[in-house]
């Protein structure tokens, strides 16, 4: 009976290895650089997921957009107000800007761009606006649908002039958080700097005056309370301000 | 009369075994079956463990596309301190109309270990998917499915099904065979696990990925939305855990030691070394 087997053990192992190689090879060419793994097996799994998504899924597919009647209740979690003085590491500056209805707020666009600069809310609103009703998917397991209005990250980066060396776009927030996304996600047509939610000025618990909406990833990548947007050539884990040091995945397409 | 006496039990079971000659074994588990079995076992245990941790972070299940603490749940599970916590600011309506969706801020420090929980879940999922693909290909091309897993048409009749159900109900478990052939209910169960339950887990898992559903939005339509996929993912887990307990029970009843050795070494009689075999 043993001799009648169609697939020998060696053939099975070899074809398995070949298939794995076939999976990883395009990852090396299309992904460019993988996020660091720090020798941590969990981070290796995250990197494999990132490489697989970038190499096996086609282009920049658009996430589903919903209709107005699909808009749902929406919890605000994490920081609810960076200016709240009862919070450790609260931001005096944010409290002051909030008091002035964010008229003096500026988004600093820096790094590998030809024209670094400061953008006020009015500046951002002068760009063509993008409205989208999308699903927010929290890593905790809940989902909510809201309408977001803003300007695509792409439009702002083009206005600032991305240098050819730019590979990552990093965001810094008033609540001390820092995180980055790759250029693939930054230039996605639905990746926007949102200044309005459900037809009104973005509420403070949801990230006023401007938050990121990164629809192709899990909720916590859509950072609230934006202060700076920095284009870099190299991957930056942002140390204690970033998610990796706290044991969270950098890429969250799942 | 069947009695809970180990000697009598074994005699009865072996008598049953002899009467059902289709249960006679043809060979031990082949290497790839054993490798896939244990890889999938490790992956499944890790997935179940981290899956429970992930569920504990938000122990509420819903139907449709959306669901959160501010919307009604299908049901809630009292499995962490996050269960029905009341740490919310006053809710504010988004629109000036009756029944408008609302927002409220969470003021409660929830249980959340999803940093390692999610990454380990997806790492184990990679092992399960890789093992599962290898298993499905090898099983299809080697004839393993045809010969050992999918019930033959002639076995599939009401009489043999009924007699197998009755013997299972009476806990008449034959001694360890250390490999195929399997009984009718056993085949149906294994086929259900490898062709239905595990693929369902993977596909409902994919349906919760924002990137994958951007490329394949039909995954959301298939279940009726993200939260429906999550709820089906939960019930399929319950079904698989139930399978695990019954499987373990049957393995223990038929001789844990020899079954374990057979699934690890491939020796069909479950002996530790070949030269001990008759």
Image (cartoon, rainbow, N blue to C red):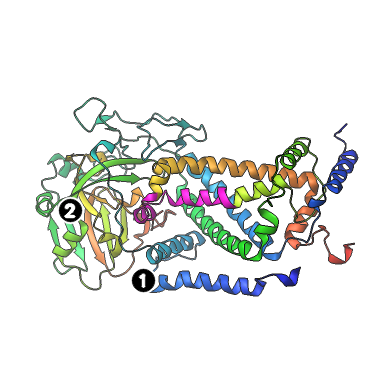
Element assignment for label 1: helix
Q: Nearer the viewer, mark 2 or mark 1?
A: 1
Q: Earlier in the sequence, mark 2 or mark 1?
A: 1
Say which chain tag 2 marks.
A
Above or below for B60 versus B41: above
**Residues packed near mark 1 inside 10 Å, few (<14), some (14 to 19) or many (20 plus):** few
Q: Is residue A20 visible?
A: yes
Residue A91 placed where, x, y %? 24, 46
Q: Is residue A66 left or right of residue A14?
A: left
Q: Is residue A122 left or right of residue B221?
A: left
Q: CA distance from mark 2 to mark 1?
A: 27 Å
Residue A239 placed where, x, y %? 37, 59
Q: Is residue B223 left or right of residue B249?
A: left
Say which chain tag 1 marks.
A
Above or below for A236 versus A215: below
Q: Which residue is mark 1?
A: A30
Element assignment for label 2: strand
The residue segment tinted magenta is B195-218
Question: Residue A151 bears which disc, if any?
Answer: 2
In which quadrant of the rendered view does residue A201 lie?
top left
**From the image, which quarter does the C terminus of chain B lie in?**
bottom right
Q: Check residue A67 for magenta coloring.
A: no
Residue B210 placed where, x, y %? 37, 51
Give the residue displayed 13% in from the left and 55% down from the top: A119
Give the residue displayed 31% in from the left and 42% down from the top: A79
Give the residue displayed 75% in from the left and 56% down from the top: B180
Q: How many marks?
A: 2
């Amino acid at each position: 009976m043993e001799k009648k087997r169609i697939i020998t053990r060696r053939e099975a192992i070899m074809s398995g290895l070949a298939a794995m190689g076939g999976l990883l090879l395009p990852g090396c060419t299309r992904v460019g650089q993988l996020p660091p793994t720090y020798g941590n097996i969990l981070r290796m799994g995250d990197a494999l997921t990132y490489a697989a998504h970038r190499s096996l899924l086609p282009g920049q597919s658009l996430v589903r957009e919903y209709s107005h009647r699909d808009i749902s209740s929406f919890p605000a979690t994490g920081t609810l107000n960076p200016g709240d003085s009862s919070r450790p590491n609260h931001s005096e500056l944010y409290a002051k800007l909030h008091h002035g209805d964010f008229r003096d707020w500026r988004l600093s666009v820096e790094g590998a761009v030809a024209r670094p600069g400061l953008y006020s809310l009015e500046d951002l609103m002068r760009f063509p606006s993008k409205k989208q009703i999308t699903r927010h998917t929290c890593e905790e397991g809940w989902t909510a649908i809201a309408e977001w209005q803003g300007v695509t990250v792409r439009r702002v980066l083009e206005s600032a002039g991305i240098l050819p060396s730019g590979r990552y776009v990093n965001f810094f927030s008033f609540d001390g958080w820092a995180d980055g996304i790759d250029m693939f996600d930054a230039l996605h047509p639905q990746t926007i700097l949102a200044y309005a939610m459900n037809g009104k000025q973005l509420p403070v618990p949801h990230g006023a005056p401007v938050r990121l909406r990164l629809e192709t990833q899990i909720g916590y990548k859509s950072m609230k309370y934006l202060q700076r947007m920095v284009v870099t050539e190299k991957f930056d884990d942002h140390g204690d301000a970033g998610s990796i040091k706290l044991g969270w995945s950098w890429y969250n397409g799942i | 009369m069947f009695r809970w006496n180990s000697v009598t039990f074994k005699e009865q079971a072996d008598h049953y075994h002899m009467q059902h000659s289709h249960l006679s074994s043809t060979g031990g588990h082949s290497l790839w079956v054993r490798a896939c079995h244990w890889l999938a076992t490790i992956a499944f245990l890790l997935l179940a463990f981290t899956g429970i941790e992930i569920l504990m972070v938000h122990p509420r299940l819903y139907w449709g596309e959306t669901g959160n603490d501010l919307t009604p749940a299908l049901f809630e599970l009292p499995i962490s301190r996050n269960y029905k916590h009341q740490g919310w600011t006053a809710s504010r309506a988004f629109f000036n109309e009756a029944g408008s969706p609302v927002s409220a801020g969470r003021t409660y420090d929830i249980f959340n270990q999803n940093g390692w929980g999610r990454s380990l879940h997806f790492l184990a999922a990679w092992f399960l998917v890789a093992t599962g693909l290898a298993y499905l290909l090898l099983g299809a091309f080697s004839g393993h499915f045809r010969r050992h897993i999918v019930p033959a048409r002639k076995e599939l009749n009401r009489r043999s099904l009924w007699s197998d159900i009755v013997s299972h109900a009476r806990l008449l478990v034959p001694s360890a065979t250390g490999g195929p052939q399997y009984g009718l209910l056993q085949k149906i169960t294994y086929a259900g696990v490898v062709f239905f339950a595990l693929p369902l887990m993977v596909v409902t898992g994919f349906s919760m990925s924002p990137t994958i559903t951007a490329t394949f939005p039909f995954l959301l339509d298939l279940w009726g939305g993200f939260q429906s996929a999550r709820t089906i993912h939960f019930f399929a887990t319950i079904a698989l855990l139930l399978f695990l307990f019954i499987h373990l029970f049957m393995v223990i009843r038929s001789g844990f030691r020899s079954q374990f050795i057979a699934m690890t070494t491939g020796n069909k009689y479950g002996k530790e070394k070949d030269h001990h075999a008759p």
